[in-house]
Image: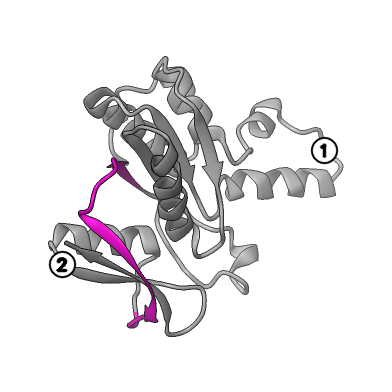
Amino acid sequence: MPMTPQIPPMVARRLSQSARLAVQLGLEMVARWQPTRLLCVSRHGELVRTFGLLQQLIRQQPLSPTDFSMSVHNTVAGLTTIVGQQTMPASSLAAGPDSFQAGLTEACATLAVEPGPLLLLYFDGMVPEFYHPWVPERESAHAVALVIQRGEQWQYQGRAVAPAQPLNQALAFWRHHLLNDATLVLPGPTTNQGWSWARS
């Protein structure tokens, strides 16, 4: 597990692995780029913690106040702004397997009417075994952050046939960006459907 020096130890101990990665990355990006808005995106959010709470309810056991407060989908957005002592507007978004694409769309729409820069922070972690029949992907905890401003560098091209892709949308985008690819197709929620982007 990477070190998270910007998160107070008492806070870090309460966070899931993916949330810790996301908050640390968010704090680093805020310190470096001073974004004016924060958009947190996650397909599953704090699903492991939420599943644990559901198990406690089934067993009629008392719920942990900490687990309950940390189970909401905007945990990362709240902690990034609180720990970073930021007053910027922050929101959270989830759209199933299309969550990262939805985040890019939301970021572009926001920047069309509001000045930037905007921090797009995507994170996800392990899915409890109970959900494996419905969510076959097996991903380790990860986080991807983009500071986005108005510009022409990337343009959305529409739907396209998506090649087989072992990575989710956020990791696929990051891989193509690091490889400096001129075009990329983010995998969509159904076989062979994807979202095409081009670098100018």
Residue 126 to residue 30: above or below: below
Q: Which residue lies furthest to the right in this view?
A: 60
Q: Which of marks 1 and 2 is nearer the N terminus?
A: 1
Magenta: predominant secondary structure element?
strand
Q: Give the range drawn in magenta.
A: 144-164
- Asked if the stretch drawn in magenta spans residue 72, the answer is no
Q: Where residue 61 is drawn, which disc sits there?
A: 1
Whether residue 12 can be seen here: no
Q: Mark 2 points at which residue?
A: 181
Q: What residue type is labelled 2?
A: Asp
In the image, farthest residue toward the top: 85
Q: What residue type is labelled 1?
A: Gln
In this orientation, which residue lies closer to the viewer: 40 or 45? Answer: 40
Residue 177 is situated, as x and y percent measured from the top left of the image, at: 20, 58
**Residue lying at 38% horizontally and 63% vertically, measured from the top left:** 169
Q: Please state if 137 lies on the left or on the right of 65 as rendered.
A: left
